[in-house]
Image (tube, rainbow, N blue to C red):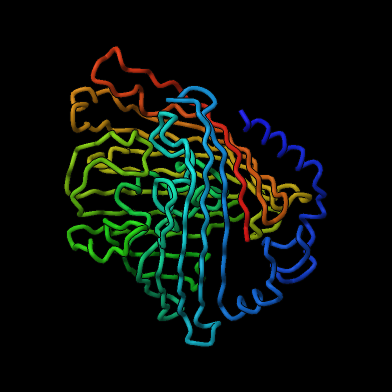
Amino acid sequence: MQIFHFCIWVVLLAIILPASAICSQADSSPYSGDLLSRSTLTGDWGGMRTDLTKKGVTFDLNLTQVEQGVADGGKSTNGEYGGRGELTFKVDTGKAGLWPGGFLTVELEGNFGHGVNTRNGGLLPVNSNQIFPMPGKDQLNIPAVNFAQFLSEYAGVVVGKLDTSGGDMNEFAHGKGNSQFMNLAFNLNPTLMMTVPYSTLGGGVIILPTKDPHAAIISLMAISANGKANTTGFDTMDTNKLTYNIEGRVRTDFFGMTGHQLLGGLYSNKNRSSADPRLSLDPDTRLTGEKTDSWAVYYNFDQYLYEPVKGSGKGFGLFARLSATDGNPNFLQYFYSLGLAGKGVMASRPNDSFGFGWYYIDVKSPSLSGPFGLLSKDFLGDEQGVEAYYSVALTPWAILTPNIQYIHGAQKHTLALLPADRKDIDDATILAIRLQLIF
C-alpha cells in the first residue's frame, strides 16, 4: 500500500528537517517570522492579523487530508482519500471596543473525498475527521453561529447554533480527528452522540466559580435534539425533542502537575430509535428499539506525569473516559477508554506529539427492522480497539501524522438472508497518514 511509502517519508523528513527551523520564533507575534518558524502558513498578512487579534477579531483556518486503508481484516481492504477544512471566525466585543463580555463565534466547515469508516467492522468511525460537519461526501455547512455574553466575572449566557464537540474536553484526547487521535473513541465520548447532535440550536448558562475558565467551569444547556449542520434548525424546534446537559470541569494539581477532572450528565425527552448516522454501520442497516427518554452520565480525566514547565502544554500524561447510558434506545450502554499521550517531550521538537489509547464498548444488542430483524440476535457484540500515532511537526503549521489502529469490531458478520451468503468479519488493522495545514 502507498501508506507505507508515506510513513517512510515521515521518518526521513523528521531526520532531515533542522530542529532550529521549527523551534525559533523571531517575533513576539505567533503569526510573524519566516516561513518555517511562524505558527501559520499565511503569516501575519502584513501585520493586519496581529492588529485584528489585538482588537478581538480572529480567523482560524485549517485543512486536514487523510489517506487511510484497511490493511488486513475488516469487510474490505480498500484505501480511501478524503479531508476536511474548517474556518472559525471569532469576535471579542470587549477588545473590539464595543461592550465588555461578549463573544461571537461562527464556523464554516466542509469535507470531501471518502473514508473507510464502514469497512472495518467497528461501530465507531476510525476517521473522525471525515464525519464532520455531516457524514457523506462534499458537505459544506455552517455548524456554529452563536453568541455568549458574560453578565459578571462569574456567569454568562450563550445562545444560537452550537458546535457541541467542544464538550467533554480532555487535554490529551479531544477534537474532530484533525489532530491527536483519529478514532472517535478518543475524540469525544461516543455514547453521547445518540442524544447530542453535533450542530444544533440551543442555549444555556456558563458559570465560572473562580472567575478563571481554565480553573473551573460549569455549563447548563438545553438544546434541540433534532439539530443538523446543514439546517438552521428553527423548523424542527420542539419542546418534546430537547436534550438537557450539565457538565463541570475543574483543574487539579495532583503531584504538583496540571490535571483536569470532568463530570457530566444528560437527559433527552425525544422519542428516538437506536440509530445514529455517524456510527459506522452499513447504510442499509436500520435499527429499531424506539423509546421515549434517554439518559447518560459521563466522566473523564487527564493528568500530566511529566510537565517541565507547569501550564505550558508540554509533557506527557494519562487520560481516561467512561460513561453509562440507559441501554435502550442507546445501545452503546457502557464505554471505557484509557491512554497515554503528550506533546513537546523533546526540547528539540517542541511541536511533535504522540498518543496511545485503548477503548471498550459494552453493546446492548438492538434489533434490526425489515427482513433482517429475525437474523439480528448476534449481529452486534462488544467492541474494543487500540490506536497509536506520532505527529511530526514539519513546521508549526504543517503536521504529518502516521497512524495505526487495530479494531475488534462489534459487527461479527455481514447481514444476509441466507446463512450461506454471510461472511465473517475479522479483526481489522487500519493504517493512515494525515496531513494538517494551518493557514
Image quarter (top left, top right, bottom left or bottom right) of the C terminus: bottom right
Q: Work out whether 287 lies above or below 397.
A: above
- Coordinates of residue 294 in the picture (x, y in percent): 23, 48
Give the vertical position of 157 relative to 182 (above or below): below
- Judging depth in this view, the residue of 311 and 413 nearest the camera is 413
| Residue 117, quarter of picture | top left
- Give the number of marks: 0
| Residue nearer the viewer, 369 or 258 | 369
Q: Is residue 373 left or right of residue 30?
A: left
The residue positioned 40% from the left and 30% from the top of the image is 383
> What is the quadrant of the N terminus in the image?
top right
The image position of residue 369, as x and y in percent, is: 19, 33
User: Which of 78 and 206 lies nearest the eye of the viewer?
Assistant: 78
Residue beneath the point at 32% across and 17% down = 422
Q: Quadrant of residue 165?
A: bottom left
Left or right for 437, reference 269: right
Identify which residue is drawn at 42% across, 53% down: 139
Asked which quadrant contains residue 400, the reply is top right
| Residue at the (21%, 47%) spot, across then down | 272
In this image, 15 relative to 76: left or right? right
At which x and y percent is residue 119? 43, 31
- Residue 102 location in percent, x, y? 45, 79
Vertical relation: 127 (above or below) 437: above
**321 or 27, which lies in front?**
27
